[in-house]
Image: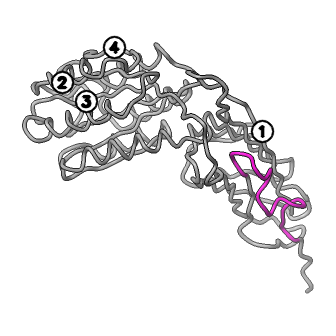
């Protein structure tokens, strides 16, 4: 019996980087080169996005940053002192046009520094130095309060980020990974991401990772508190290298192709269409999605992918204007 094969490929020119010179480049890469005609088969399509490396920026994107620190009793000593040192070094590296707020939590959360431009660094560092450890761990409340400070200056012209640091288990208020994942998802929809830093051996890794992943941000584990300033510096360096923000990916499968979902992601298809939101891309960064599809072997088009994102256009002294761009690619069988 002779099998008829259909070649899986990309539309002309799409195998190479698209739209040379743009900030994000889009490729679709099938897992194999052909399928049997008229025979339903599962394939995996790689949706590959990369930010152009080496693209120079005239001025960086201003930050809207909320630092949320655990000051529960278990932070007493070196943990808290290194945390304060790292936070003060962060203040030193911020620009006058950046927005900073500081929230601390133990039995409850409180705003220590309300959202404001970084104009008086000495006053900000004095507030940080005044933090003392005591009480329990109202982590959920701390993140919500930090997000509330972000919303005071929420703008698509800024990078809106919460940095959460905790060394223990959330034991006041909502405290399950599901609770924190849902919170992270809601914040992501509003354009706010939450980087989490777990310190020591006692914290809830599942909870901290769930919050970061759901809001499309970074998660760090720090066993040695001496490395806290290094982690804060790394996170700030990534934010200062952002090339594209508010990245929204739309995937449409035509009739005859059954989308089976994404590998490692929770987004679902509705009426053959799914949307995936990513907070940002840093210069030179590469990220991808893996889409599982059931193709019937006689339809030429497997998926159509459209990516919208905001690229920074540095046209004025103190603010940036976001330039919205769109790229589209098709995969065929």
In the rendered structure, find residue 106 and report the number of the disc placed on it. 2
Rounded to the nearest whole Å, what is the CA distance between mark 4 and mark 2? 18 Å
Residue at the far left in the pictured view: 77
Dot 2: what SS? loop
Q: Quadrant of the C terminus?
A: bottom right
Comparing marks 2 and 1, which lies closer to the viewer?
1
Residue shown at 57%/34% (left/top)? 59
**Magenta region:** 7-25
Q: Is residue 44 left or right of residue 127?
A: right
Which color scheme did the rendering employ for the protein? one colour
Residue position marked by numbered label 3 in the rendering: 69
Closest to the observer, 76 or 42: 76
Which of the pair 67/211 is nearer the observer?
67
Q: CA distance from mark 4 to mark 3?
A: 14 Å
Q: Say which element carries label 3.
A: strand
The residue pinned by badge 4 equals 114
């Amino acid at each position: 019996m002779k099998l008829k094969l259909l070649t899986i490929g990309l539309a002309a020119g799409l195998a190479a980087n698209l739209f040379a010179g743009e900030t994000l480049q889009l490729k679709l890469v099938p897992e194999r080169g052909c399928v049997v005609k008229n025979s339903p088969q599962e394939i995996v399509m790689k949706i590959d996005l990369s930010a152009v490396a080496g693209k120079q920026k005239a001025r960086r994107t201003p930050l809207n940053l909320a630092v949320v620190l655990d000051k529960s009793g278990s932070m007493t000593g070196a943990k808290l002192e290194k945390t304060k040192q790292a936070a003060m070094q962060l203040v030193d590296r911020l620009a006058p046009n950046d927005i900073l707020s500081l929230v601390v939590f133990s039995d409850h959360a409180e705003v220590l520094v309300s959202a404001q431009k970084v104009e008086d660094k000495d006053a900000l560092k004095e507030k940080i130095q005044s933090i003392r450890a005591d009480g329990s761990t109202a982590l959920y409340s701390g993140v919500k309060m930090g997000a509330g400070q972000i919303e005071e200056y929420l703008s698509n012209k800024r990078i809106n980020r919460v940095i959460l640091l905790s060394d223990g288990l959330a034991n006041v208020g909502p405290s399950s990974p599901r609770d924190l994942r849902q919170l992270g998802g809601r914040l992501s929809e509003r354009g706010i991401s939450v980087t989490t830093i777990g310190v020591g051996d006692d914290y809830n890794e599942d909870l901290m990772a769930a919050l970061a992943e759901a809001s499309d941000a970074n998660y760090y584990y720090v066993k040695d508190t001496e490395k806290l300033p290094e982690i804060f510096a790394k996170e700030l360096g990534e934010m200062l290298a952002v090339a594209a923000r508010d990245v929204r990916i739309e995937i449409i499968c035509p009739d005859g192709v059954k989308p089976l979902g994404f590998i490692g992601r929770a987004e679902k298809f509705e009426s053959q269409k799914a949307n995936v939101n990513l907070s940002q891309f840093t210069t030179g960064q590469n990220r991808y999605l893996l889409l599982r599809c059931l193709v019937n072997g006689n339809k030429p088009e497997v998926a159509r992918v459209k990516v919208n994102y905001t690229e920074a256009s540095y046209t004025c002294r103190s603010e940036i204007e976001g330039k919205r761009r769109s790229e589209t690619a098709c995969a065929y069988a």
